[in-house]
Image (cartoon, grey):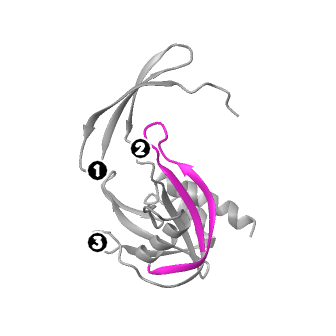
Amino acid sequence: MNSKKLPEILNISTIAKTNIFEVQAVDLRFSNGEERQYERLTPQRRSSVMVLPIHENQLIMVREYAVGPERYELTFPKGIVDAGEQPIESANRELQEEIGFGAKRIEPLRALYSGPSHMYGLMHVFVAHDLYPSQLEGDEPEPLEIVYYPLDKIDELLGDPHFAEARNLSALFLLKEYLRHV
C-alpha cells in the first residue's frame, strides 16, 4: 500500500465550461511543499459500464462513430450508470439498448480507470452469457452496426486497426484471461 500523504487541495476553480464538459483548475500542495496546478474534467463521480457479450462462441460488438478520432470504431456495448442503478443493472440495460439482447448471467471482470490523471473515469467491465432477445430504446443518434466476432479469433481482433480504444483492448485482455479459467 502507498503510505504517501495525499496533496492538499488549495483551490478548485472552473476555467472552461461547455454543454457537456467542465474543466477545473486544481491548485495542489504536495507533502514536500511543492505547489502545482493541475487541470481536470469536472468529476461527475458517475461510473460507466462495458459489457463483453458472448453468444454461440462469438463476441457481439458494435461499430459506432467516435468523434475524437473522427471515425467508426469497433467497440463493446457501454454506457453511463444511471442514477439509482447498480453497475450490473446498467450492463444489462446497455446490452438491450445497443445489441437487442438481455443476459441471464453477467459476471464482473474488473473495474478500471481511463485517464485518471485528468478525470474520474471509473468503468466496470463485465462478461455476459445466456443471452436472450430483448430490445430497449437507446440514445444513439443512428442505428448501431452489430458485429459478431468468433471467440477463437480474439488475437486477430487485438490487431484490428479499427479496434483501437485502450479500454476495449484492456477488456479483451481481461476476457482472454477469464476464458482461460472457465
| Three-letter amino acid code at the position of disc 1 | Ile
User: Residue 25 versus residue 78: which sits nearer the camera?
Assistant: 25
- Label 2, label 3: how many angstroms apart (C-alpha)? 28 Å
Q: Position of residue 98 (x, y in %)?
A: 41, 73
Kindly state the secondary structure of the residue where label 2 is placed.
loop
Q: Position of residue 127 (x, y in %)?
A: 60, 68
Kindly state the secondary structure of the residue where label 1 is placed.
loop
Residue visible at 24% across and 45% down in the picture: 18
Q: Residues within 10 Å of mark 1 (few under 14, many from 20)?
A: few
For the magenta stretch, what is the residue range? 100-128
Q: Is residue 102 magenta?
A: yes
In the rendered image, the residue lying farthest to the bottom is: 133
| Three-letter amino acid code at the position of disc 2 | Pro
Marks 1/2 in contact by CB < 8 Å: the verdict is no
In the rendered image, the residue lying farthest to the top is: 33
Q: Which residue is mark 2?
A: 43
Label located before the other in sequence (2 or 3)? 2
Residue visible at 45% across and 74% down in the picture: 147
- Quadrant occupied by the N terminus: top right
- Label 1, label 2: how many angstroms apart (C-alpha)? 12 Å
Q: Which residue is mark 1?
A: 20
User: Residue 64 versus residue 29: which sits nearer the camera?
Assistant: 29
Q: Which residue is mark 3?
A: 142
Marks 3/1 in contact by CB < 8 Å: the verdict is no
User: Residue 54 versus residue 120: which sits nearer the camera?
Assistant: 120
Residue visible at 63% across and 25% down in the picture: 4
Q: Position of residue 163 (x, y in %)?
A: 46, 59
Q: Quadrant of residue 172?
A: bottom right
Label located before the other in sequence (1 or 2)? 1
| 77 lies above or below 104 | above
Closer to the eye: label 3 or 1:
1
Residue visible at 47% across and 48% down in the picture: 121
